[in-house]
Amino acid sequence: MSNYKTETKCIQSGYEPGNGEARVLPIYQSTTFRYTSSEQMGRLFDLEESGYFYTRLQNPTNDAVAAKICDLEGGVAAMLTSSGQAANFYAIMNIVEAGDHIVCASALYGGTYNLYAHTIKKMGVEATFVDPECTQEELDAAFQENTKAVFGETIANPALVVLDLEKFANAAHAHGVPFIVDNTFATPINCRPFEWGADIVTHSTTKYMDGHAACVGGAIVDSGNFDWETHKEKFPGLTTPDETYHGIVYTEKFGKGAYITKATAQLMRDLGSIQSPQNAFLLNIGLETLHLRVPRHCENAVKVAEYLKNHEKVAWVRCPSLSGDKYYDLAQKYMPNGTCGVITFGLKGGRDAAVEMMDRLKMVAIVTHVADARSCVLHPASHTHRQMNDKELVEAGVQPDLIRFSVGIENIEDIIADVEQALR
Ligand SMILES: *Cc1c(COP(=O)(O)O)cnc(C)c1O
């Protein structure tokens, strides 16, 4: 980890060219890497030596970008994945087996909810979803003998629930399991979950990190803080021999790098959800301005939220940075400089008025995306969360009339003017 400040890390971390080398991170558009000795290549396959041999496992462009994200989060090791979904899948699958169990805060991105509630269930891994505002006793009661991880989002998409990170971290640690946090919406510009006890952070880099809606991607970062060896019997995948690598034990051989090395050497080898080096290159360009874009998104979002709050046709507005919001105090604690550019609101006319208002927007587009430079809206009950029934929607913190507004970095007067004409 470098000692640079965040803004400098956005620009400088991850890639340092040698004399006469490209100043800008090169795209290693190559599936494979050359060796002069067969013996040496063999050692790479045995994880006896580190080096590149096949892009499904590692690529220098991807590694440089992962190192930048790692530095921004203050971790010890990181990897890129093909999407945020892949990141959240790998983050869990790296430490569970059929018969295991995880505890999740129920306010989650719809795709992550499907993944944990339905898809990993078919693989024999059960999830218990807890209300993010549950009491300590309720949270403790969710744990089982076979629980292997706790998962939550710093700011839930789209419920905008700010997670009480310390409460969830303490519960996870009291039960001897790591706390995994999806930090997509806050980004390390506004919140660094490792400072609040999280052990592993995931990202959909598709959102603010890329920031331009140009490429889908994900990342996993390990703080190196969770001691797998102390809870050896819970995590045999990390603490007992891996026969597919001649019996190496990840924690013995790689220490603090064990978790990411296993995810790369085993999950990526077998499941193959790599990010393309082209996308990693674009992601890196996005990261260079993350520290400039995120504050502007937040500033514009608060202004739109204030405007909506005072509008006669608006029933309710959620923006955790706005005083009076249910999560204002938690936001002030965990992300005092800002939350994210996404706000939600409902109209007095309910679900039908929401759909009509969205159709009337001119500049602000209806798209299945959030957190890029362009302002956009989505109606989760008709789009991202449409497979959920009303009970599941409410548990995920999504009202049927909820409009998700991802406030962009256009001029604030133009954004508000568009909203104004649509409401009129
Ligand atoms: C978008 C999103 C994901 C999924 O990421 P993809 O890159 O679309 O696969 C996961 N978590 C959160 C919080 C998201 O917003």
Image (cartoon, rainbow, N blue to C red):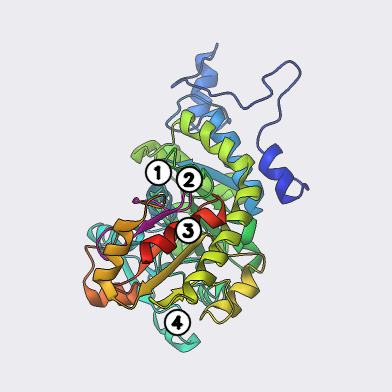
Q: Mark 4 points at which residue?
A: 139
- At mark 2, the secondary structure is helix
Q: Label 3: few (<14), some or many (≥20) within 10 Å?
A: some
**For residue 381: magenta?**
yes
> Within 10 angstroms of label 4, few (less than 14), some, or many (20 or more) residues?
many
Q: Mark 3 points at which residue?
A: 417
- Helix, strand or loop under label 4: helix
The residue under the point 62% across, 64% down is: 338
Q: In the displayed structure, does residue 267 sit left or right of residue 50?
A: left
* Start-end of magenta stretch: 366-383
Task: State the separation of the CA atoms marked 1 and 3.
Answer: 48 Å
Q: What residue type is labelled 1?
A: Leu
Which amino acid type is marked by label 2? Lys
Q: Which comes before the other along the chain, label 3 or label 2?
A: 2
Q: Is there a contact, CB below 8 Å, between mark 1 and mark 3?
A: no
Residue under the image location 43 percent in, 61 percent down: 419
